Image (spheres, rainbow, N blue to C red):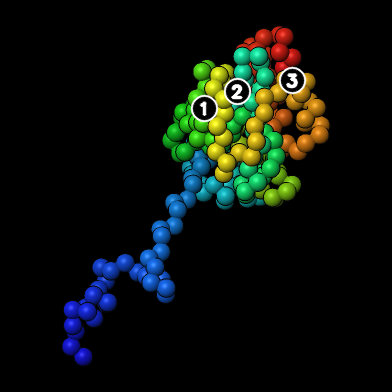
Amino acid sequence: MPTTPATAAQISPEMPEMMSNGVQPSEAPAPIMLELVDEDGTTIGTAEKLAAHQAPGLLHRAFSVFLFDESGRLLLQRRALGKYHSPGVWSNTCCGHPYPGEAPFAAAARRTFEELGVSPTLLAEAGTVRYNHPDPASGLVEQEFNHLFVGLVQAAPRPAPEEIEDTVFVTAAELAERHAAAPFSAWFMTVLDAARPAVRELTGPSGGW
């Protein structure tokens, strides 16, 4: 059969592939990559985010942020119910993973704004901590070399609903009560305890931290 302009258009290799309903499929989202590290925190490679968290877990770089108001109260977030890892539990102000090659400080500031809609008025390094925490609900594992940051926030949080279900400012005493009564992330107390020296320096002896 001779090829007409119409049939040529139908078989042209330059035409984007269509699904059976005639709709062009959207491109799959690019995988989120994490930075793998050794026990000293030296970068040794990369891995896809979910793969890094599947048991037994791959040691990777992470960060945790603790922001306080002018009264020395800690800003907590309740993770959104739609998150695949530790949904619906309370945790520190913000936590996450730098992109490969991204400085942890830059990642902490970026992600705090993306999740909470605020930029800290002060953000300081507070050391690192390495831990291995399985999440009993999902079966995922947190094998992390975590960079800690403490700081101050003055603006009211404007949380992204796909990331955060709720937020609250708490004193040290209120945190103890809430932690005894509500589920928290598996890593929360580990990162808080590691950051306490810097938290006490930031909030002063009267803060009770």
**Figure quadrant of the C terminus:** top right
Identify the element where label 2 is drawn. Answer: strand
Q: Residue furthest top?
A: 205
Nearer the observer, 136 or 42: 136
* Residue at image coords 57%, 25%: 156
Nearer the observer, 57 or 205: 205
Residue 39, numbered circle: none
**Do the residues bearing badges 2 and 3 touch, measured as CB atoms within 8 Å?**
no
Q: Residue furthest bottom?
A: 1
Residue type for callout 1:
Val
Disc 2 target residue: 67
Q: Quadrant of residue 197?
A: top right
Disc 3 target residue: 172
Alpha-carbon distance for marks 1 and 3?
A: 22 Å
Disc 1 target residue: 118
Residue type for callout 3:
Ala
* Residue at image coords 51%, 31%: 117
Q: Is residue 14 above or below residue 32?
A: below
**x then y, percent, for residue 31:** 47, 50
* Residue at image coords 41%, 60%: 26
